[in-house]
Amino acid sequence: MGKSKNEIVQLVLYVQPAALRPVAAAAYLGTSPFAIEELWRNGKLKYRQIGGPDGTRVSTIEQLNAYLHSLPEKTGVLVMRGAKKNRTALTAVA
């Protein structure tokens, strides 16, 4: 079978996703997939379910942007946390 002279061949080089699963959503927001799951569970990040009740949960780019923009902007030094915080607390007591 030959191709007609008017047939156009299209090649898709890039598709911008409309929604992201936890791993990609986490990369988009700069956090972990576990954090995305927690945000979904506690209702802080909206999601859509694709494929019925047992389907995949995804957050749209708009939902991810809305969540990000709902967070307060901050400047300055972060409050110490983790092992460094514990060492400082122990040093202050001694």
Image (cartoon, rainbow, N blue to C red):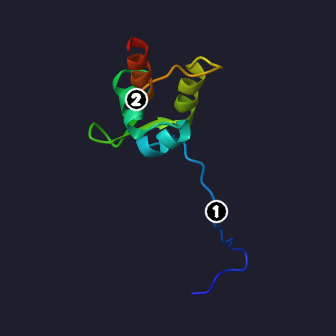
**Residue found at the far left of this picture:** 54
Q: Residue at x 59, y 17 (%)?
A: 72
| Identity of the residue drawn at 58% across and 30% down | 65
Residue at the right extreme of this rendering: 5
Q: Residue at x 34, y 26 (%)?
A: 41
Q: Is residue 55 left or right of residue 78?
A: left
Residue 80 image point, x, y percent: 49, 22
Q: Is residue 77 left or right of residue 33?
A: right
Residue in the picture at 38% in, 12% down = 93
- Name the residue that disc number 1 marks: 13
**Outermost residue, bottom side:** 1
Q: Disc 2 on helix, strand or loop? A: helix
In this view, the residue in front, 6 or 14, is 14
Q: Which x, y percent locates residue 1?
A: 57, 87
Disc 1 residue type (three-letter): Leu
**Mark 2 — residue?**
83
- Asked which secondary structure carries label 1, the reply is loop
